[in-house]
Amino acid sequence: MTVQVGEKAQKSTRAKWKRATSYDVAELAGVSQSAVSRVFQDGASASKQMRKRVMAAASKLGYRPNAIARGLITRRSNMVAVIMSQQTNLYYPEVLVQLTQRFSNHRIRVLLFTLKSEGDIDSTLEQVLQFRVDGIVTAAMLSGAQLATVQEANIPIVFYNRSLADIPSNSVRCDQEEGERWLVAQLFGSGHRTFAIVSGPEDSSVSTERTTGALRMLREHGVDGVTIATGDYGYDSGRAAFARIVDRHGGPPDAVIAANDVMAIGCIDEARESFGLNVPGDVSIVGFDGVGPANYAAYDLSTVRQPVERMTEAAVSMLIDRIENPELSAEKRVFSGERIRGSSAEFAADPG
Amino acid sequence: MTVQVGEKAQKSTRAKWKRATSYDVAELAGVSQSAVSRVFQDGASASKQMRKRVMAAASKLGYRPNAIARGLITRRSNMVAVIMSQQTNLYYPEVLVQLTQRFSNHRIRVLLFTLKSEGDIDSTLEQVLQFRVDGIVTAAMLSGAQLATVQEANIPIVFYNRSLADIPSNSVRCDQEEGERWLVAQLFGSGHRTFAIVSGPEDSSVSTERTTGALRMLREHGVDGVTIATGDYGYDSGRAAFARIVDRHGGPPDAVIAANDVMAIGCIDEARESFGLNVPGDVSIVGFDGVGPANYAAYDLSTVRQPVERMTEAAVSMLIDRIENPELSAEKRVFSGERIRGSSAEFAADPG
DNA sequence: CATGCAATTGCATTCGAATGCGATGAGCCG
DNA sequence: CGGCTCATCGCATTCGAATGCAATTGCATG
């Protein structure tokens, strides 16, 4: 019963040591457990001296509130799940960092789930739900059934750069199609007439949007017979794709539209190195994303940059709003990309 | 008392719906709560028909075990914390992805913590401990006191690419110094005599190791008066650093040793674009890391690649071993980097 | 000094699942 | 058919903190 300062030293020596609980602190401070609990809350009522006594006992014991136990009783884990496909994170590390930091400002932690492909979502989702996260941000596509599962569990969810047509759901995305249309317009406006496209993985909805966006715009301009090569968003696949395009097309096209910057860079290197072509003299090449290597001097890509800062901020606030008020109706926010005129493509003159 | 199939439909309509618990499932299945619990465990004993009844009731109610509640009673959250400084994740997204996936294979989830600088660790650490994670992987440096706090809480921790001298602790790292020594040896062996260094942020221990490693080797070769410029690991800072070096050195040195690949690329671009220099004709430039852009054709860096796969695997298994057996003594694993001879530097001829 | 009101504090219960222990029953062997 | 073992199941308790409600205290007011 005699709890002393020496107690603390014993902690490290005793073989199976239990971490201090609010009861231990209460006992040492000579108060009730509820008092301890209240001292460690924000809005709870506790007198100054109570605070002092409890804090003293707590630091003596090295007590820390147990977030797990708290989560059980409050039904709030203070954790959100972030689901990313492998590629998403490899090419947008910023997205993850920013989401994490912004959530962190609201005292919310990120539980990370990565997918090898966008295929094995079901098992992942099961895990997410078991952990009783307060909300979900997903950069991977969900099927209607999967979304229904999440909604049945009453967990708010925000889609990042994807959205389900016809189903009310929250999403934040960059307008891929608009961006591609601008790129095509610039290319076409400056005289390019034969085109090729390097698409991303087939299970990437972002790639699909970009590719079909470009194709649609091209068709509107009467361009047909566009060569399409598939890549995996990686540098090497970009190089290989360019080689295949030249092969199938019987020479380089006027312009190549890659589904992301990294593959565009691959195309540039392949064009220059393996085919001795000038970029943009012999062939114009454009990408999409506007991150990292896109503005290295050797490439200086013409591309569309996603406004990552505003998008992550939107996703975070949108999710938190729904956590705090589940009745809020669904909302989709679409951001225009920032148009970047690099030297990797011959573009129409700047208007104005 | 009459629980029917229609029950399920009510869920979505009832305003405040509680998620199904093991008691609900037990009642519907006409068994005890413990039975339900056992069915949802791995090694627990439950008869075939019991399983069937329980699973039927569970899926009817959309029941999912509550990982939070489970964590409270088992004292295992099945979560580990991964602490990264912002830069670490921006330049090694692979590290995070691989850690996450490897832990995931062991049914362990990653709770992510990112640091703006390596400064605000204390508050982060407090959060980590409150969440009662089973273990920690940190790619940020901890002070002795901070490490002590973690160890007092009996939480296994593994350092990724850093380690505390003189203190027994678990770490997995790439031998930065060895790598730098090799780079210097190659440069010196091929006739370079004047050197400059682009270091990373001052609070980055990795940068410090690399920089001092290079400096030590240079001194052993009798090279002194090395110009040092500081960057922030980013592309622009690499370009700026090169300009400052030329300025202070009164012309380009024979070789520039950058603390990472991205800054090395910045140096190359600045040398070529702003100074019209040939790389490696007029100046050799080497980096460190060996990821992503390092092997783009335009740069083709000479660098040292960190064996990320083996390192993450080592970190994961080391941590899991300690979670399962806390008595295990500390261990440090050091991996040699993979030596890459690119064309960004004139190197001595390949031996043998 | 009595009364009223508000701020503190303690008691008892609750969140949802895991588990030691005892009870039950099935299956097996002699 | 008796006895024994082993698998299976239920009961009751436990993990650690939050919270509604009641009790207590402090303070101001008439």
Image (cartoon, coloured by chain):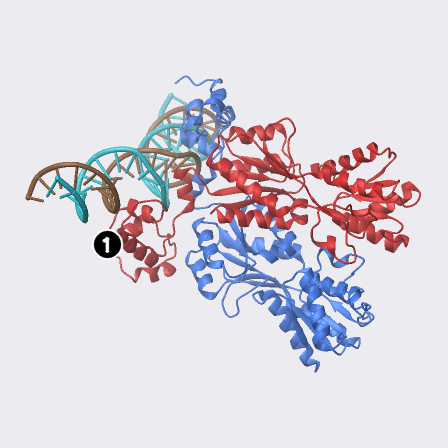
Chain colours: A red, B blue, C brown, D cyan
Give residue A223's position: percent from left, percent from top.
86, 35
Q: Can you say whether C7 is above or below B95 in the image?
A: above
Question: Toward the viewer: B267 or B331?
Answer: B267
Residue at the extreme right: A250
- Observer able to see residue B302: no
Residue for badge 1: A1
Figure quadrant of residue B104: top right
Classify residue B188 by image quadrant.
Answer: bottom right
Look at the image and tell me whether residue A153 can be seen: yes
Comparing A212 with A142, the one in front is A212
Q: Is residue D6 above or below residue B164?
A: above
The x, y position of residue B209, in whole percent, is 61, 69
Where residue A72 sits in the image (x, y, percent)? 41, 39
Q: Residue furthest front?
A: A352
Work out whether residue B242 or residue B331 is closer to the camera in this orientation and state it: B242
In the picture shown, does residue B43 fall above or below A5? Answer: above
Image quarter of the N terminus of chain A? bottom left
Is residue C7 positioned above or below A145 on the image?
below
* Rendered image quadrant of residue A192: top right
**Is residue D22 rendered to the left or right of residue B138?**
left
